[in-house]
Every structure is written in C-alpha cells, then in structure tokens.
Image (spheres, grey):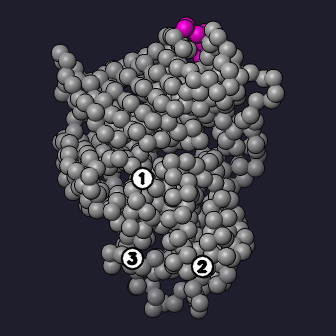
Amino acid sequence: MTSGARVRRTALAVGTALLLPLGVAQAAPAGDTTGARGIGDPYYPDYGNGGYDVDHYGIHITYKPKTDHLAGRTKITAHATQDLTRFDLDFVLPVSSVKVNGERATYTQGKHELVVTPRQALATGEEMTVDVAYAGKPSTVRSDGVRPWIRTDDGAAAVGEPEIAAWWYPANDHPRDKATYDVSVTVAKSLEVLGNGVLVSHDARNARRTWHWREAKPMAAYLAFFVAGQFDIERSRVDGLPVITAVASHGGREGRYAARDLRRTPSVLRFEAQQYGAYPFDAMGGVAPAADFGFALENQTRPVYTRGFWSTGSNIYVVVHENAHQWYGDSVSVHSWRDIWLNEGFASFTEWLWSEKHGEGTAKQLFRQYWRAYGRGNDMWKVKIGNPGAHNEFHYAVYDRGAMTLQALRTRIGNADFMAVMRDWAAQHQYGNGSIPEYIALAESVSGEDLGSFFDAWLYSDRRPAPTEANGFPPGFRSRVAATERSAVPASWSKIQHTHAVLARVEGR
Ligand SMILES: [Zn+2]
C-alpha cells in the first residue's frame, strides 16, 4: 500500500501495541468444538477465524452503482481443522441464508462476525461447503470504526487494507488463510469490471454483462478486489502472461499519465524479477479508477491506484512500489499485521533499487538523503517499525525507516549476501506467510553474522540508530550535514517523496 494516511496516523503511534492482549487463542481447548472468533492476530483479535481453512471462494455479485446496491452469493470450499459445531466468518452485510454442505444452517450476525451453526457437526479434516446469500449497501456500513467501501465517479472500488473483504464477501479475513478465487460481477452493459488474475469471460445477457475473473494462486482475502466503472482497457501478452491495464474513461490529464505508466508494468516486473526471482503469478496489470481515495493497493496481479498519484505528471515509482509487493506482501504475506515492515519497507526499498539502476540516485545516496531530511527529533525514529501498533501499520516510518533498514543491512552484510537473503525469503515463503523473527533468522543464517543488535536498533528502538558500522552505516559516515552537501539531492528524491507523502485528502479512517 502507498498512502498519505501514514502521516495522519502518527498520533496513534507509540505505546498502543503494549496494551493489547498478545497471543490470542487460535487453537481451541480440548473438547471445545466452537471455532475461535479470531485467527490469533495480536493487533486484531477479531480478524480471521479459527477451526477451518478455506481452499476456494466462488463469489457472485450483482452491483448497481447508482444506488450502491450489492446482492451476492458466495460459495466457500473449506476444510475443518478441528471438530466443529459452530464457526465464524468475517462479514458485515445483511445475510438472508446460509447453507453448510447443502443443508440450511442457523446463523447470527454481530459486529464484524457471521456466526454459523451447521445442522451436522463437522469432524477434523472434513471438507465443507458454505453457501451464503446476502444483500446490502456496503458504503453505509461502518464496523470497527471504518467504512472502507469506495464509491467512484461512475462505479465502486472494493479495495482496502486491512479491511475490505467483509464488505463484499464473507471470508476468513486474515493473510494466514489464503485461498484461490473465482469472482463474477454482473453490472450494466455500459460498465466494465476489473478483478484479480485472468479474465475467464465477460458475457452479455439482456442489458447486463457478467465479468468472471479467476485467481488461481493462493491469495489473502484483503487482496481480492473488484472495481466497476467506465474504463479504457488495454490487453496484451508479455513473457507468456496476460497483461490487463485499465484507466478510467474521461480520466483527463491524470488518466493519460496513468495509462502511460501502467503500460510500463511488465518492464517494472521484469526488473523486479531480476532482483528477487521469478514473478510468482499468472497475470499482471493495474487499474486507475475515477476516484480520489488517497492510496494505491497491491491487489494480487493487478494493483489499484488513486488518480492523485499522477497529479503532477508521470509517476513510475508508485508502480514500482505496488508491483514489488507481488513478492513481498502478496506471495509472501505477513504472519501477523505487526509484521507489516516485511511489506512496506521492502516495497519502498525497491523504489531505491529502481532509482539506483536507472541513474536517478543510488540507494546509498538516498539513505544519506533520508538521514539529512529526518533529524533526530522526527517521528520516524519514535515508531518501532518491527511492532508499530494496531492502526499504525501505514505510518511513514514503516516505509522510509523501513527502506533505510534494508539499505543498512545491505551495507552491513554486503550486496551479494543481501540479495541472496531477499531472493531466499521470496522463495522459501512463496504463496505463504512470514514473520520478522523468521526474516532476521534467515539474514543471520545467510550472512553468518549475529544481527541481533542491528535489528534491535532499526526495528525495535524508539530512537535514531547510532551511525556506526555495526548499524550498517558506511565507513566514514558523517552524522553532521555539511553546508556543501545540501544541494546534492538525488534526482529520485522528490519523486519518491511525492509517492510517499502525497495525498493529504485521504480515506476517512
Ligand atoms: Zn505498500
């Protein structure tokens, strides 16, 4: 994700994490056949659910933008991971029926949770299908203080992090439970619908058209999306994969810049594959709707961008950032939301690599520039980016101090070992999850060095790291900024700043 929200969330920063209960139960106590209401995330005890694991979502939506009316039917294929007499789904729209294995189930709806009691209890390991019918106006529903549904000039965008899934389909909404997806959305014939993965069909019937998208690789629930509206769609094939980019029709000057930069997505991905290993998915692209929602999101195979990223012209850095997430965030997802540095620090650092390889300033120069720009008293140094606190995942520190951390690691262990760590991380956790302690263990194993105090200084301290070689600063690093240095700013600096700090008019959290 790239967002202006970070700046606004600063005040929530330090301290909140410690007050939250850690280690929420995920395994049921012996004899308990109730699926837990949360998967065990220390920041968000209600997120995800216990007792089952989803294999596939088959989602059918009919959507009318004018009234924001969404009617849906979702068929979930899952298997029980414990004996189950009752289980939860994360969902906020009004439900009209639930069937489990073809039989009507009883259910109740509370805050964020749909609690299902099947007629027949399920045994550990048993396959189950859960069929949920529902309808509502997603833009009107607020839950846990958020209302993430986005209405655009001519449609809607089901795009958000970490919340969005529960506003359009019932889910086990946590990155730890990945699944494959078939998403069909029916809209008026005058509209287009974009989604993840490959376009299976887009058949018209009477005045409507149904767009069927398929994501065949495991995907976290929040990365599933659809956007409906009037789009100019471009389709091609690159390296054997389908490329679909879409920019809002009548997008004006911003739309023209967006279209031009989104066309470069395949070459951005090729650059990133050279750094991190083969691209992990079956399709690529990007979507720029007619809306100002204040962020971009790394939706699997096809990121979605607010148009404001192109308000001052071309912006390839946001495309680099969101596509880097295809490795770090989408293929390798966080184990818990407190691991968010593994997403945002890594995607931000990839912008530095892009700058370095394209003659706009080296990562070493950018590291120096951040040091100059963010003095000792800056908020960036107060946020422990390895555990930033609930609702503080998108603080700019996680991005910018996060990228500095990786460049410092590169200096500390050398470029060859560093790139090996990055590639091994993507390969070892492909289509799965990873935590920061696991990443630290990998970096120590590849480099053969004890990096405990290094990572303490960069990830777990609320102070600026001392500029020592042990902390990954180059030999002879001058802490003080000389007057002669002030004019030597890397060419990419203002572009990365624009991408990272932009949009003050942000989604209302
Ligand atoms: Zn991001």
297 versus 96 height, above or below: below
What's the magenta region? Answer: 103-110
Amino acid type of the residue that numbered disc 2 sits on in the rendered structure: Ile
Say the numbered circle drawn on residue 280: 1
- The foreground one among 173 and 163 is 173
In the image, residue 28 above or below residue 340: above
Cα distance, mark 1 to mark 3?
A: 24 Å
Disc 3 marks which residue? Answer: 356
Left or right of residue 433: residue 182? left
Of badges 3 and 2, the one in the foreground is 2
Q: Look at the numbered disc 3 and give the secondary structure of its residue.
A: helix
Image: 62 above or below 225: above
Give the spatial CA distance, label 2 vs label 1.
Answer: 27 Å
Q: Real-space Cα distance between discs 3 and 2?
A: 19 Å
Residue type at tag 1: Pro
Name the residue located 76 percent from the left edge and 43 percent from the top edge.
23
Q: What residue does disc 2 label?
A: 413
Pinpoint residue 360: horizontal percent, then vertical percent: 34, 77
Residue at position x 48%, y 50% from top? 331
| Amino acid type, mark 3 | Glu
- Choose the circle earlier in sequence order: 3 or 2: 3
